[in-house]
C-alpha cells in the first residue's frame, strides 16, 4: 500500500512538472511568436497599400523574418517596360515618404540598372525589374521594416 502511494505521488509530480514546463514555454515563446506574426501582418499591409501601375497583377505575396526584421515580398506581372515601371514607382513611393537611395545593376542587366533601393524612416524597399524584352514582365518588390521595437 505504501509503495502504491509513493508511485501515485511521483506520477502526480511528473504531471505537475510537465504542466509547469508547458506554461513556461508559452509564457516565453508565445509573446514572441505573436509579435513576429503581428509585424509580418503590418508589413504585408504596408506593401499592399502601395498603388500598382495600371494593369499590373499580383503574382505572389509572402512575408518572412530575416534576422529578426520583418519582410514582405511581392511579385508582380505587367505589360509596362521596366523603365516605365521604375519611373512610376519613383513618383508613387515619393508620395509615401520614400526617397531613392541607390540604383544598381545585376550582371544580367548590363548596361542599364535593373534595381532601385528606396528608404523611408521606417522602411527599406527594393524594386527589381529585369528587362526581358517581352511582355508580360515580372518584377519584384521587397519591403523591410528597419525600425522595429524589441
Image (cartoon, grey):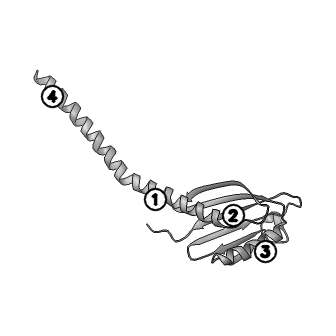
Crowd rating for badge 1 (residues with CA inside 10 Å; few <14, some 14–19, many 20+): few
> Does the rendering let one see residue 106?
yes
Circle 3: element type: helix
Closer to viewer: mark 4 or mark 2: 2
User: What is the quadrant of the C terminus in the image?
Assistant: bottom left
Q: Which residue is mark 2?
A: 141
The tag earlier along the polypeptide, 3 or 2, is 3
Circle 2: element type: strand
- Does residue 16 sit above or below 70 in this rendering? above
Answer left or right for 117 relative to 37.
right
Disc number at residue 87? 3
Tag 3–tag 1 contact (CB < 8 Å):
no
Q: Which residue is mark 4?
A: 6
Give the CA separation, mark 2 to mark 1.
23 Å
The tag earlier along the polypeptide, 3 or 1, is 1
Tell me which residue sits at (45%, 69%) in the image: 149
Closer to viewer: mark 1 or mark 4: 1
Q: Position of residue 128 (x, y in %)?
A: 74, 65
Foreground residue among 119 and 136: 136
Answer left or right for 100 relative to 10.
right
Give the CA separation, mark 3 to mark 2.
14 Å
Disc number at residue 35? 1
Give the CA separation, mark 4 to mark 3.
78 Å
> Does the rendering let one see residue 67?
no
Amino acid at each position: 500500500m505504501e509503495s502504491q502511494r509513493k508511485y501515485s505521488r511521483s506520477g502526480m509530480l511528473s504531471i505537475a512538472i510537465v504542466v509547469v514546463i508547458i506554461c513556461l514555454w508559452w509564457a516565453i515563446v508565445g509573446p514572441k511568436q505573436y509579435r513576429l506574426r503581428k509585424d509580418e501582418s503590418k508589413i504585408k499591409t504596408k506593401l499592399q497599400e502601395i498603388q500598382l501601375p495600371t494593369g499590373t497583377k499580383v503574382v505572389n505575396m509572402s512575408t518572412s523574418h530575416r534576422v529578426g526584421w520583418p519582410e514582405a515580398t511581392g511579385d508582380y506581372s505587367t505589360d509596362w517596360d521596366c523603365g516605365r515601371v521604375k519611373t512610376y514607382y519613383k513618383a508613387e513611393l515619393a508620395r509615401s515618404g520614400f526617397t531613392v537611395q541607390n540604383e544598381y545593376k545585376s550582371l544580367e542587366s548590363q548596361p542599364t540598372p535593373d534595381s532601385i533601393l528606396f528608404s523611408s524612416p521606417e522602411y527599406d524597399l527594393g524594386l527589381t525589374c529585369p528587362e526581358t524584352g517581352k511582355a508580360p514582365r515580372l518584377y519584384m518588390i521587397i519591403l523591410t521594416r528597419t525600425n522595429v521595437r524589441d
